[in-house]
Amino acid sequence: MARMSDRRPPQIELLPDGSYRPQRPPIAARVFAWAVVIAVAAGALAVAAFALWFALILIPVVVVAALIAWLAFRYQLWRARQRSWPRGGWPRGGWPRA
């Protein structure tokens, strides 16, 4: 008992030079390929947006850290100046000249 197959027979298009014409992939494969391209582009955009958000969040932290470092530096200069100052204040006749 022979049954007829529900599948369509393959279409082979032979060109005059003896080569075969390449077949286009089915519409579902093309849609899937474009969906993958769009998903990868959206993922890259999301990663870039997250990196920008993280950099913008760090700006106030960096400013506060720089302010603290500057204040610590000024405090060290103030302490060094206090330690090197003569205990009796300015000499009455001025500093000795070399």
Image: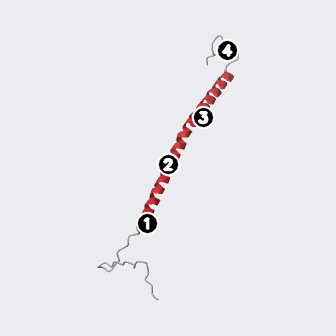
Who is closer to the viewer here, 57 or 37? 37
- The structure residue drawn at horizontal position 67% and vertical position 14%, both measured from the top left corner, is 89
Q: Position of residue 82 (x, y in %)?
A: 67, 22
Marks 1 & 2, CB-CB < 8 Å contact: no
Q: Secondary structure at mark 3?
A: helix
Work out how far the residue at label 3 is from the one at label 4, CA to CA, in angstroms.
Answer: 36 Å
Give the residue pinned by disc 1: 28
Nearer to us: label 1 or label 4: 1
Identify the residue shown where x is 45% and y is 63%.
32
Report the front residue among 91 and 8. 8
Nearer the observer: mark 2 or 4; the answer is 2
SS for dot 2: helix
Question: What's under tag 3, amino acid-wise?
Answer: Ala
Residue on which the image places disc 4 = 89
Q: CA distance from mark 3 to mark 1?
A: 55 Å
Compared to 79, does 25 lie above or below? below
Residue 48: numbered disc: 2
